[in-house]
Image (cartoon, rainbow, N blue to C red):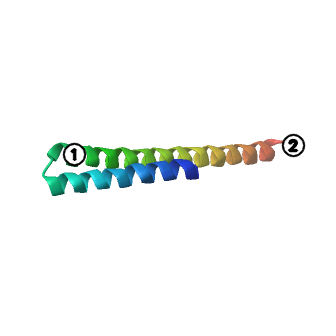
C-alpha cells in the first residue's frame, strides 16, 4: 500500500469519526451513520490493500519454490 493510499484512508477514517461525533452531539442519526459508513469504507480499503500485498508476497514465494524445483531437476 502506498503512503498516499494510507494517508487517504486515514483522512477518510478521521472524517468519518468527526461526522459520527457531530451526529452524536447534535442527535442527528443520519450524520452519525454516515460517519460510521465512512470509517467502515476506510477500514475495508485498508484490509483490501493488505490482502493484495499478502497475495503478491505469496506469488513471489511460489515463484521462488518453482525456481528451486527447476534447478534441482536439471542435470
Where does residue 58 sit, x and y in percent of width and height? Answer: 58, 47
Where does residue 18 sit, x and y in percent of width and height? Answer: 30, 55
Q: Residue at x 59, y 44 (%)?
A: 56
Indicate the secondary structure of the residue bearing disc 1.
helix
Whether residue 23 sits left or right of residue 63 in the image: it is: left
Q: Residue at x 18, y 42 (%)?
A: 30
Q: Residue at x 56, y 49 (%)?
A: 4
Q: In the depicted view, which residue is nearer to us: 67 or 57?
A: 57
Place residue 69 in its image quadrant: top right
In the picture, the disc for residue 3 is: none
Between the residue at mark 2 and the residue at mark 1, the CA separation in whole angstroms equals 69 Å
In the picture, the disc for residue 75 is: 2
Q: In the depicted view, which residue is nearer to us: 54 or 27?
A: 27
Q: Residue at x 52, y 47 (%)?
A: 5
Q: How many marks?
A: 2
Q: Is residue 3 above or below residue 63?
A: below
Where does residue 33 sit, x and y in percent of width and height? Answer: 21, 45
Q: In the depicted view, which residue is nearer to us: 3 or 28?
A: 28
Let me know if residue 32 appears in the view.
yes
Where does residue 59 sit, x and y in percent of width and height? Answer: 62, 43
Foreground mark, 2 or 1?
1
Residue that badge 1 annotates: 31
Whether residue 21 sits left or right of residue 57 in the image: it is: left
Indicate the secondary structure of the residue bearing disc 2.
loop
Circle 1 crowding by C-alpha within 10 Å: few under 14, some 14–19, many from 20: some
Circle 2 crowding by C-alpha within 10 Å: few under 14, some 14–19, many from 20: few
Q: Is residue 10 above or below residue 45?
A: below
State if disc 1 and disc 2 touch (CB < 8 Å): no
Amino acid at each position: 500500500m502506498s503512503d498516499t493510499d494510507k494517508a487517504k484512508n486515514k483522512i477518510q477514517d478521521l472524517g468519518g469519526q468527526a461526522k459520527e461525533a457531530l451526529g452524536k452531539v447534535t442527535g442527528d442519526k443520519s450524520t452519525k451513520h454516515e460517519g460510521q459508513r465512512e470509517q467502515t469504507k476506510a477500514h475495508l480499503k485498508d484490509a483490501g490493500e493488505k490482502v493484495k500485498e499478502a497475495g503478491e508476497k505469496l506469488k513471489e514465494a511460489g515463484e521462488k519454490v518453482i525456481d528451486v524445483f527447476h534447478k534441482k531437476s536439471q542435470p
